[in-house]
Image (cartoon, coloured by chain):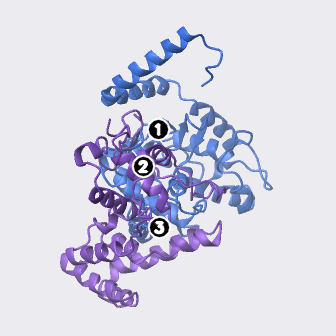
Amino acid sequence: MRTSGMTPRRKALIAGALAASLSVAAAAQDDTQKEIERYRQLLAEGNPADLWEARGEVLWKARRGPKNASLERCDLGLGPGVVKGAFAQMPRYFADTDRVQDLESRIVTCMVSVQGFSPEEAMKNPFSAPERPSDMEALASYVAGASRGMKLAAPLSHPKEIEAFRIGEQLFHRRAGPYDFACVSCHGENGKRIRRQDLPKLDDPKDAQKIFTTWPAYRVSQGTVRTMQHRLYDCYWQMRHPQLDYVSEASIDLMVYMAKYANGGTINAPGLKR
Amino acid sequence: MKASVRMRAVLVSTASAGLIAACAAQPSDDDARSRAEQIFRESFTHGNQAMLARVERQDEVQALCSLYRNEPPREIAAKIERTQAATIRFPAQGKLMGDWRRGEQIAQSGYGMRFTDPDTKRPNGGNCYNCHRIAPQEISFGTIGPSLYGFGKLRGSGEAVQRYVYAKIYDPQASVACSNMPRFGHNAVLTEEQISHLVALLLDPDSPVNR
């Protein structure tokens, strides 16, 4: 804070206000939480992610890539061309790739098979930087938004889906690195926080249904939409792990693990977060 | 369930080769575990080799705590606590209490050991406020760990308490096996001197924690 140009009176006023706010705030954590919720509600009435969703729809329908084709023939699990409701049944097993896939890995598959991009091109820029917007953030917003209001119903019946869940469960509890952290270190108990950020207990349906269904999300602190792949990448970064490979099997297995507990929750993506 | 967990415990604690035998005893769970290890390796392929090697290979404590979901049976817990306590190094000069002001900086800082932290000259932080309430002026604190506000006021600042706090930060698993808290000294996240500053933050009567 720049204070050099301030009058003593102004400085005293600010110091007084600061002291008052600190003493009140310490005793009023609950009120703070309520205020954050209220702020969230205000913002939720006009989520900037709408812009990503709109851009995603344009991209989805545009003829692109070496095959000059749109993604409208992409099979997201409910048949070629069906976008509505597809996200509500992901991650899921896909016979053509013989893999369990999440939203992003499936979009990559379609960019390769339908549009003719190389896998490298399709995965080139999944996480935007300020001067480098990401098509994936827009495409994921569009597809997720087309399931808004529906209940998550990720299938967990195919043997590969069941295996993915079991591996995800192991990874969720796997402690490693200089901090000894696993996912469960932060997401294993109800009602906990890092700093002021609430942490969901991800194997509790009450928390998982509320949280898993709101990614992708516009992140106010980053000024962009981030995807679930980015959320996991960011978690491992904080866990002092190396970079989690984009659409890696570990990332998808962890999503299947979370989806099992989140099933039944109402999709409200793209969401809005700190 | 309990019996099979205990059986696996024996196998794991004997030797890593025991894991192979455990696979035969518990095909479903142990199969998922070894598949998960393989998928973990295949899913982290970028970055520097030292960092990759460090997460791929769990130490014995990490492996046991993962296996038992942080609730090891009593005998395994006792073994972890015993072996971890033996690794604690107290400061060479014997000075357990440093400067609480520097302790506060360390408690605030989250710098270090992430794949985007290239400056190895900049000291690592302790991330303490991420999980604990400490000085009352900082209202952005986490709740994964207990509140430490007033820690020294309640317990004094004698040498026994200093040693207790130092050891707790150096290796929390020396007293609570599979604690969520990082082993800051054991894993060389913080130096002995840095830990002594954190001891001061919690115990010094002049620290905001105790005033």
For image coordinates 56% across by 36% down, the residue present is A221
Q: Classify residue B165 as left or right of residue A250.
A: left
Q: Is residue A264 visible in this depiction of the protein?
A: no
Which residue carries the number 2 mark? Answer: B128
Q: Secondary structure at mark 2?
A: helix
| Disc 1 from disc 2: Cα separation | 38 Å
Indicate which label's residue lies in the foreground, 1 or 2: 2
Foreground pick, B121 / A54: B121
* Image location (x, y in percent) of residue B38: 51, 77
Which residue carries the number 3 mark? Answer: B187
The hue in which chain A appears in the rendered picture of the protein: blue
> Dot 3 falls on which chain?
B
Q: Disc number at residue A148?
A: 1
* Image location (x, y in percent) of residue A236: 52, 58
The amino acid sitting under disc 2 is Cys
Disc 1 to disc 2: CB gap under 8 Å: no
The amino acid sitting under disc 1 is Arg
| Disc 2 from disc 3: Cα separation | 16 Å
For image coordinates 29% across by 48% down, the residue present is B146
Q: Secondary structure at mark 3?
A: loop
Indicate which label's residue lies in the foreground, 1 or 3: 3
